[in-house]
Image (cartoon, helix red, strand yellow):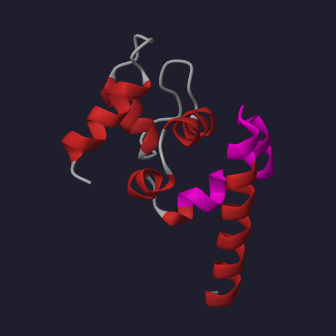
């Protein structure tokens, strides 16, 4: 994913807030701890609820996903179907990491 596509996705996330896209990008990439009312965990949950899994894989490295995709994060998802989906993904990622690690 190139930077312009990434900016477009981030802009769509904050359409109803006055948060500069550059701040969201800095938060996503770890250059800042806060963007508007988002911290890295809240932004991750918003992205999980907004975009499909394959888009998330393009926005975050697997290392960051495994760090952020916690039970707490999954339980904060509003839709039960998303919670179920990400519980499965979390389990599979743990299996893959334990086999390769």
| Foreground pick, 16 / 101 | 16
Asked if residue 58 lies left or right of residue 52, the reply is left
Q: Which residue is depicted at the point 64% across and 87% down? A: 101
Residue at image coords 62%, 32%: 42
| 26 displayed left or right of 79 | left
In which quadrant of the rendered view does residue 99 lie?
bottom right
Q: At which x and y percent is residue 33?
A: 53, 34
- Asked if residue 52 is positioned above or below residue 13 in the image, the reply reads below
Residue at screen point 19% across, 40% down: 4
Instruction: Decide whether residue 4 is among the magenta residues.
Output: no
Quarter occupied by residue 90: bottom right
Q: Vertical placement of 15 versus 24: above or below?
A: above
Task: Please check the rendered image and state whether residue 78 is part of the magenta-colored stretch, yes or no.
Answer: yes
- Give percent across and percent down for residue 62: 52, 65
Report the predominant secondary structure element of the magenta stretch: helix
Residue positioned 44% across, 12% down in the render: 17
Residue numbers of the magenta segment? 64-83
Residue 74: % across, % down = 74, 45
């Amino acid at each position: 994913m190139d930077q312009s596509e990434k900016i477009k996705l981030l802009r769509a996330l904050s359409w109803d807030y006055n948060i500069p896209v550059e701040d969201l990008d800095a938060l996503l990439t770890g250059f800042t701890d806060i963007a508007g009312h988002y911290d890295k965990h809240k932004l991750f949950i918003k992205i999980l609820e907004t975009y499909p899994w394959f888009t998330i894989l393009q926005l975050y490295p697997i290392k960051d996903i495994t760090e952020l995709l916690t039970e707490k994060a999954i339980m904060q998802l509003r839709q039960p179907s998303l919670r179920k989906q990400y519980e499965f993904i979390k389990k599979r990622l743990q299996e893959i990491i334990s086999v390769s690690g």
